[in-house]
Amino acid sequence: MSNPTQQSVPADNPPAMPINNELAMQRTGLAEKRTDLAEKRTGMSAQRWSQGLTVAIVLLFLGLAAFIPLALTGVELADVFTLNSQVVQTLTAMTIFLLMLTLGVKTPLASLVILWQQPGLLGRSLLAALVIFPLGATVIGYLFLHGQPEAAAIGLGLAVLAASPGAPLLTQRASMAGGNVAIATSLQVTLATLAVVTTPLTLLLLTAIFARVQASADYLLIAKQVLTVQFLPLGLGILIRSLGREMASDVGDLLTTVANTLFMVLLVFLLGFSLVTIPTVPWRGLAVIPLVVAFGLMFGHLLGGPNLETRSSIATGTIARNAGLALFLATANGAIQAIPTIIAYMVVGAIAALPYNVWIKRQQQAIAEE
């Protein structure tokens, strides 16, 4: 007689193969769905990029079209595309407005307030960016430029830069320097918010220290300009994100493409101008910039607390001035003699900060290997 238990084994095994086949088919179906979803997301991303690029081009041509009548009335285009022209002023204002609007739409509220939840770090960060850096730039500039014929122009450029904190691309620079992106974002928003008050106040104090300059001194007007191109779009972006949470991501992606396109156009303008303007800056003006950058990095690093990533973010936020806002204020208020120094700071300052970025990355690597 055969053992019943041995007969039951073959009877129970056959259903296993259909079950395995069903599981394999389900997994294949899920994989195909994921592939389709990824393709749709890629297509939507490409579509948003295309739409954003189109909007940016339209805005650019609308901005430039306003100056066509100047050419028709006999004004040379070479005179229009100069550092103190309305074209550069308008392009700069549009770029800053869209960058700040994008920042407000793209940044979650939790990231905006992360620095505010650490009052000690917040206070030290503001001390470094709004007090120590402007004072250091003033003292270093005074020591190098006192009694020199170029002191007025370079000093004014340093003053406008010192009064323009919160660079729009601070998060990207902090990331390149190995910093904490959330801290950098919160610091950027905080500085942009306070700039309505701190920018005219800093200019009032610093321009009084340097030699007399032929420039507008309407500080209430400067506050309104900062409010219009920086604080207003930032607040509008935060409002859009809070009201349309589901659409905030799509709107943010579209705005990012538009803002980045305009920023690249402005950057091309400024790089072209830099080839002409930087050689006109006296050697003393170029020598001051690395010293000011080193001073800002040192104090920002020291005041950033024990965490290396946080220190890097605060140090980078201290020296990363809003060159777009500085250019806008210079062109809008008749201080065109400050523009070469502002452009020189963008180029020379970025180069001067590279050793610090490399050092931070090596320190982080050494810590990770321990």
Image (cartoon, rainbow, N blue to C red):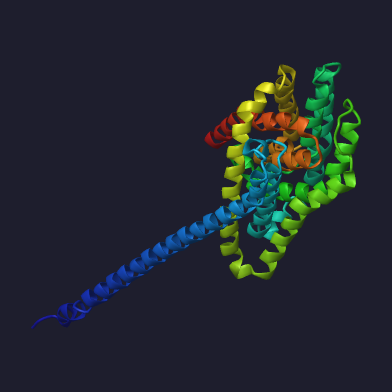
Residue 258 found in image quarter: bottom right
Instruction: Name the residue located 41 percent from the left edge and 62 percent from the top edge.
Output: 38
Q: Is residue 265 above or below residue 346?
A: below
Q: Residue at x 72, y 61 (%)?
A: 236
Please tell me which residue lies in front, 49 or 271. Answer: 271
For the C terminus, the image quarter is: top right
Q: Position of residue 180 (x, y in %)?
A: 64, 44
Question: Residue at horizontal 30%, vertical 68%?
Answer: 28
Q: Is residue 260 visible?
A: yes
Taking the spot 82% from the left edge, 22% from the top edge, the residue there is 151
Question: Which x, y percent locates residue 41?
Answer: 45, 63
Q: Position of residue 293 (x, y in %)?
A: 71, 28
Nearest to the observer: residue 300 or residue 317: 317
Residue 119: in sight, yes or no?
no
Asked if residue 267 is positioned above or below residue 140 in the image, the reply reads: below
- Tell me the quadrant of the picture where the N terminus can be found: bottom left
Q: Is residue 129 above or below residue 91?
A: above
Residue farthest to the left, as pictured: 1
With 338 as the anchor, is 241 left or right in this view?
Answer: left
